[in-house]
Image (spheres, grey):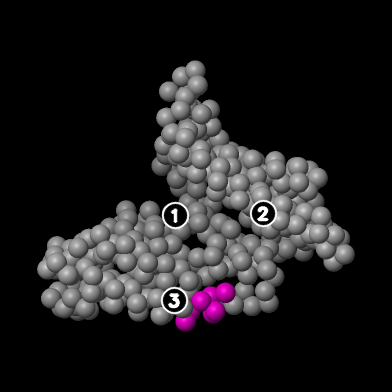
Amino acid sequence: MTTLLTINSVFYLIGFIVMLLVGMTLRDKGNPKRLTTALFWFLFGFVFLFSDLLVSTLGKPMAYRIVGVIVVLISLIAGAGLLSIGSYRQSTPEQRHASANKLRNKLFVPALLIPVITVLCTLFLKGVAVGGVYILDQKQLTLAALCVSCVCALLVGWALTGGSPLHAVRESRRLLDSIGWAAVLPQMLAMLGGVFVAAQTGKSVKDIVSLFADPNNRFLLVVIYCVGMALFTMIMGNAFAAFPVLTAGIALPLLVVGQHADPAPLVTIGMLAGYCGTLMTPMGANYNIVPAALLELKDKYLVIKTQIPTALVLLSANILLMYFLIFRHS
C-alpha cells in the first residue's frame, strides 16, 4: 500500500526549508562569513533533498561515498570556525514586553501541541488507511506524526501571533545561526552509532575488558559497565547510541551470561547511567549547548558545569542500585 505522508516527504520538507535559509544567508551582507555559512547549510540541506536521487541515479555505494564527503566538508567548515551569526532586526524591550502581555500563556499552546498531536497520531493512525492509502508512514510512524504536529503547531503559532510563513523562516534562520554546528549533531551521532555497530565495537570492548577485569568480580564489572555507559554517551552524545555497544560488549557476556544477572534491571539502570554522561558532554547538544545558545549565556558550557555534580551523584547511585538489584536472585 502507498502512503500519503512518507518519511521521505518529511526529509524533502526539511531540505526545502534549509535551502530557503541558505538563500537568506547569501543575501545577508551583514554576515561576515555568509559564503561559508551558506555552504555549510547548503551541504546539510543537500543530503535531505537529493539523497534519494543520488541513490537512484548513481547507486548506493557511490551515493554513500558522496554523502560521506559532504559530512567531512561540513565538519571541516565547522571545525575551522567558518560559521557566523547573521544580522537581524531586533525588537525593542518595550515591543517584547507588549507582546508578552498580549499573548501571555497562549505562547505555550503551540509548544504543547507538538507532543500531544504526536502521541495522538502515533496511537490512533497506526494502520489507518483511506482508499487503500496509509495516512502516515507506518515504518516511521512517530517521525511522520512529529512532522504533522510541528506543522499544526506552526499554523496555530501564526494564528496567535499574526505572523507569516516568511517570518517563521526568518526566525528559524536566527535560531540555527545561534545554535550553529550543534544543530547537525543528532544526524552525525546517528551515523557514528551505525559505524560502531558495523565495526563490531561491542566485541572489541569485551576483549579489552577481559584483559584486565576479573570476570568473577561482580562489583568491578558493574562499575565498568556503568562508567563505560557514561563515557561512551559523552563521546557519542546519546545513551541510545552507546547502549548497544556497551551492552553487547559487557552486560550480556560478562554480567548476564557470566554472572547470571537479571537483565531487566541491568539494562534499565544501564541506560540511566548513560544519561548521566549526557549531562556532562557538549555532544549532547540538544540538552546542553542549544539551551545555552537560546538563553544567550556568556559561557556556553555553563549548563554542563552546573549539571556535573548532579550527574556524578546519580552515576554513583546507579552503580550501587545495579549491584544490589541485578544479583538478588543468584
Q: Which residue is mark 2?
A: 108
Task: Please name the amino acid that badge 2 sits on.
Answer: Phe
C-alpha separation, residue under disc 2 versus residue under disc 1 = 30 Å
Q: Which residue is mark 3?
A: 311
Task: Please name the amino acid that badge 1 sits on.
Answer: Ala
> Which is more foreground, mark 2 or mark 1?
2
Residue 145 against residue 198 in the figure, above or below: above
Location of residue 317 (image quadrant): bottom left
Q: Nearer the viewer, residue 117 or 206?
A: 117
**Element class at badge 3:** helix
Q: Which mark is residue 190?
A: 1
Residue in the picture at 69% in, 70% down: 296
Is residue 183 shown to the viewer in this render? yes
Q: Where's the C terminus, which quadrant?
A: bottom left
**Element class at badge 1:** helix
Give the class, few, some or many, for how many residues have Cα within 10 Å of label 2's Cα (few <14, many ≥20): few
Tell which circle, 2 or 1, labels the residue nearer the N-terminal end. Answer: 2
Residue 186 lies in the magenta stretch: no
Task: Please name the amino acid that badge 3 sits on.
Answer: Ala
Give the image location of residue 48, x and y in percent. 56, 43
Residue numbers of the magenta segment:
303-309
Residue in the picture at 40% in, 80% down: 313
